[in-house]
Image (cartoon, helix red, strand yellow):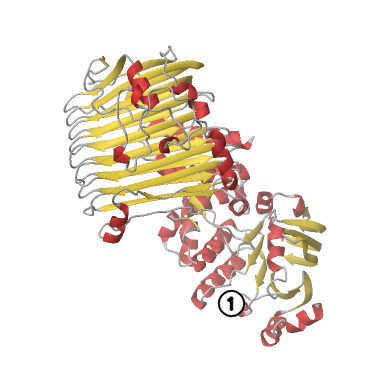
Amino acid sequence: MTSSDVYDETSIATVEDPASADVAGNAAGAAPVAAQGTLGREAAGSGPELEDEALALPDQGGQGSSHAAASRADRLRSFERGDHSTPSSKIEEWRFTPLRRFAPLFEDVAGEAAVEVTVSRPEGAAAESTLGAGEAPRGTVLVPEDLPTAIASARTEQALHLVAPKNTELAEPFRVQSVGQGAELRGHGHVVLETQESSAATFVLNHTGSAQYVQNVEMVVGDNSQMTVITLQDWDDDALHIATHHARVGRDAKLKHIAVSLGGSAVRVNTIGEFSAPGGEIEDLGLYFSDENQFLEHRLFVDHAAPNCTSNVAYKGALQGQKARSVWVGDVLIRKAAEGTNTYELNRNLVLTEGARADSVPNLEIETGEIEGAGHAAATGRFDDEQLFYLRARGIPEQEARRLVVRGFFAELIQQIDVPEIREHLFASIETELARSMN
Amino acid sequence: MSVLEIKNLHATVETPEGTKQILKGVDLTIRGGETHAIMGPNGSGKSTLAYALAGHPKYEITEGSVTLDGEDVLEMSVDERARAGLFLAMQYPVEVPGVTVSNFLRTAKTAIDGEAPSLRTWVKDVKGAMDDLRMDPAFAERNVNEGFSGGEKKRHEILQMQLIKPSMAILDETDSGLDVDALRIVSDGVNRAKENTDVGIMLITHYTRILRYVKPDFVHVFVNGRIAEQGGPELAEQLESEGYDRFLAAAN
């Protein structure tokens, strides 16, 4: 009788013991510790599929520099659109991305009224304000690392500025509701979120409807403040969305960033967090559910530039249906100055049906041996026939069995979301996603 | 009282070398309260019989019939068979990541009974059954079979049997790989289920050792896809001293 190890640890690379000079030595310098896992029945045939997506678009801006930098720290940052080359599969950070699908977002054109934005502020929040280009704090944290981000930065005249004032704790969240007005409409957005010294606030960014939307989210996490950001990509099936979230975390400050991607045709969220002073903490959580023909990409970068900071990254995704795709790339850089760093990143994928594919790449660069801990793990498991048989042999009907496994898989993450209505919404969304696969 | 009737059961499996006939006409009737030991050499098809009865998709039934209390088992889906009263304690239970033992047991119990168990008695029942099987309470919060030792997996299977209370239980090599202490604990669990319910048991085993703890009413020697000989407990003693050679020679 066969028994299969369904939770296949296809890849794990861990640096657990910083005291080990050997491990730290290997991880330091130019070559990041990389591990890559791919799973799915298509995995063997993945080469051709990637080639198919590897469309080199005509170079529209200047020469630009190749972004295939050896260290994550070396990546070009510039507000000049001309400094960024057009995304191509030859560039490391675009190599998994279906460029043909995202192509409209690489065109440097003026935005339309593609997204209707409604903002609600909690009691105690600062008055409504916007920031023009170059008006601080806009542009002090987020400096574009790629072309679409630079376009959105240049093409957004006024950025929304949401502020929790010094020493205030806001009980209710800020809510930014973005409703796409049509899949053919191109739009840009820029939001600056700020928690001033010793304040606390939650920001919920919700995206529904459809649009071709490039969005920059800049997060200024003041000293000793606590910021929670929840971004929900709940788009209709034909939306395109590229988002860059960039945070700077001050002394003894804490950022909890949660990305949830369930909808959209193709969604790419790039989340960057850097520590500017000691004692900071970043928690990056994410959840995604990719359906038939859906592409969901999450990239993370935690930049430990200051000592005694902590970061924890945990992303989980489920995939179902033909050509359901997900990409997760988690970069962590521990710079020479960042002694006493503690970091861990994790990505888990659950492949529910054949024809789906998850890519998972953790990268850890360590430039100092004086750290508390650094580790990463990535694994992709398949919900397979033996698992289904086991549950059904206990009387549990097939649909219920799938629900049990998927709910269990996500529950631990969802419990960490402090806004009850979002927790309920997510459990309901997962039920809806599962119901789709059963039809 | 439940009756499981297997008549002239034939089953095949697809292998890289083509379709292979594994079960070649199995006849067996098990009544509630009876314990039947199915003994045989490796590769004789014992486990196939167990999995074919539970409805594993890997095996195709090509001939014969199986009924439980007159109902056609072969027409039922895997979960329908379980809800009809059939239970299979697996030799190699799989891991179910993200699902705790506690959640799994409650979901299974609810599915089998058609309604959620009363919370108060359920918590007590689970705790009692776990105590009986010398399982640490922390076990309930672990993910199903994830990181379980061989003994823990078997105890977990018997725990399910105690709580689900099937009318017919198939124990597939539940004794294999257990040390004497674990074997005694697992056997006690089986005997408790026999005392407390009218369960019929098909005890599939390669070794005679478990029969010292779980007393069979009937012993069947399973060779080459069918039952070659049957008798009472004395047949097991004969097998213990003589082994399977006589039957293997006859089959060839």
Q: In this view, does B24 lie above or below A212?
A: below
State the residue at coordinates (35%, 22%).
A81
Residue A345 visible? no
The residue at the point 61 percent across, 45 percent down is B114
Which x, y percent locates residue B129? 50, 62
Whole-percent x and y of residue A359?
48, 43
User: Is A77 drawn above or below residue B204 in the view shown?
Assistant: above
Which residue occupies the foreground of this view, A251 or A101? A101
Q: Which of A206 and A67 is in front in this view?
A: A67
Q: Which residue is drawn at 53% across and 75% down?
A: B184
Residue sitting farthest toward the front: A63
What amino acid is found at the position of numbered circle 1 in the picture? Answer: Tyr
Quadrant of the rendering where the C terminus of chain A is positioned:
top right
**From the viewer's perspective, is A13 left or right of A246?**
right
- The residue labelled by disc 1 is B213
Please tell me whether mark 1 sits on a helix, a strand or a loop.
loop
Chain ID at mark 1? B
Q: Can residue B48 be seen in this view?
A: yes
Which residue is found at the position 36% from the left and 38% from the top?
A300
Against B233, is A57 above or below?
Answer: above
Q: In which quarter of the image is residue A415?
A: top left
Q: In which quarter of the image is residue A293?
A: top right
Taking the image as shown, residue A73 lies to the left or right of residue A396, namely left
Q: Quadrant of the N terminus of chain A?
A: bottom right
Measured as percent of width and height from the top left, residue A276 is found at 20, 36
Q: Residues within 10 Å of mark 1 (few under 14, many from 20)?
A: some
Question: Viewed as shown, does residue A354 lie left or right of B181?
Answer: right
Where residue B23 appears, as percent x and y from the top left, is 77, 65
Q: In this view, does B122 lie above or below B174?
A: above
User: With A320 as the anchor, is A420 left or right in this view?
Assistant: left
